[in-house]
Amino acid sequence: MTKKVKRTPKQQLTRKQRSRIREERRIERMLMWGVGIIAALIVGVLGYGVVAEKIIEPREPVAIVDEVPITTAEFQDRVKFRRLQLQNQLGYLYQQQQAMGGQDVESAGQSFQDYFQEQISSLQSQLAPENAQALGQQVLDQMIQEELVRQETERRDITVTAEEVQRAVHENFGYDPDATPAPTASAPLTSTDALTAAQSTPAPAPTAMTESDFREMYNRYMQDGLKPLGISEQQYRSWVKASLLVEELQADMEESLPQEAEQVKLRFLSASSEEQARELAQRLDSGDDFEMLADEIQSAEESTASSSELDWQPEETLVDQLGEEVAATVFDLDVGEHTEPLKLGEESETYYIFQATGHEQRELSDAILEQRAQEKFQSWLEAQQSLVERKSIEGSVPTEL
């Protein structure tokens, strides 16, 4: 016979108990949703940080040049490349300093050791983290210039071929394909200084090398120098091309300049006192030969006077050297005529007597043409700054490789 199981009747919940349970479940659901939302926010913030650092920030412009952006990523790559250049220069100077072996040969009033130490200190200062902002600004200025030049050369239909870029790369590494390789050629220091506006260290003398030597050095530089910085060979060559476009634009500007100008050729006597200068001027007035006076001055012991010449120059070039007033005076001289004693500025303690030895319309020298082209380029560059919108580079400048 089966034993009957006595079941306890299920206790009915009161309305108050049911209400409390529903409230507890509602709070539990809210807590779960809150935790989920907070977790999602944390993941979102972290994800945004990664996206911002890796994608958004690198694409942010540090400058906009006539609607063309220069991105943070491009800027940072260029700064790292510039730091590599400076470190290469620094390494070269260290090598040269050590090669001197303690010798202290004097040249032009400055010893080589002092010169090397001065250059080393300058490079160390540029590479110092506290000067990163200044270095970054220099790099940005160069990138802006290159973009302005790129746009201008495009308008003028000026181009640089792949062959010209390759030739410039050869020169950067000291390789001359037309040179006869030496039997025992020593590889020169890798140098990319041609990409900078001004070179602050003496470049190593080119050493003849084979194409195989060049290729080995070039590949090593790409792999060991640029690749660890995240810089591609294409980027490097684009920077070489940019530097060549600057040269081509300057050359184009030079060709558009007048090739001739009215010029004067001068010689002069200088004296440390007005009394001595007036004595020399009186002797010229009395008929003494200028060259005889110059020889007399040069041969005199402990003489405080001297003589020299200024080659053919237009008036505007003389203004840069002598000042506007003196330049106008000497430019009006007839051939054989000389000035009274003149000072080049109120603070000068030296008096000069200029004599014109030639005055005619003639071709400008290469040096003067180059100077005029550079001045024209700088004037053009300054005028283009209205097209440039600069952003802050605060916090965007790499302080190391």
Image (cartoon, rainbow, N blue to C red):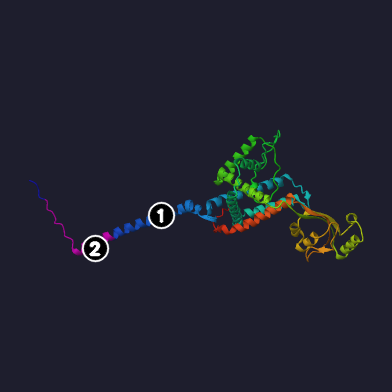
Residue type at tag 2? Arg
Q: Residue most toward the left? A: 1
- The percent position of residue 355, horizontal first and vertical second, equals 84, 58
In the image shown, does 174 or 306 lie closer to the viewer?
A: 306
Q: Is residue 136 magenta?
A: no
Residue 225 appears left or right of 361: left
Q: Is residue 122 visible?
A: yes
Q: Is residue 79 visible?
A: no
- The percent position of residue 80, horizontal first and vertical second, equals 58, 50
Where does the magenta region start and end?
A: 5-26
Q: Residue most toward the bottom? A: 346
CA gap between label 2 and label 1 equals 36 Å
**Badge 1: residue crowd in 10 Å (few <14, some 14–19, many ≥20):** few
Write down the residue under mark 2. Answer: 20
Classify 202 as above or below 277: above
Element at label 2: helix
Residue 324 appears left or right of 195: right
Quarter residue 261 falls in: bottom right
- The percent position of residue 259, horizontal first and vertical second, equals 72, 51
Nearer the camera: disc 2 or disc 1: 1
Quarter residue 41 falls in: bottom left
In the image shown, does 219 or 113 lie closer to the viewer?
A: 219
Asked if marks 2 and 1 touch (Cβ < 8 Å), the reply is no
In the image shown, does 2 or 350 lie closer to the viewer?
A: 350
Residue 390 appears left or right of 302: left
Quarter residue 183 falls in: top right
Residue 44 numbered mark, or none: 1
- The percent position of residue 222, horizontal first and vertical second, equals 58, 42
Label 2 or label 1, whichever comes before in sequence order: 2
Element at label 1: helix
Q: How many marks?
A: 2
Residue type at tag 1? Gly
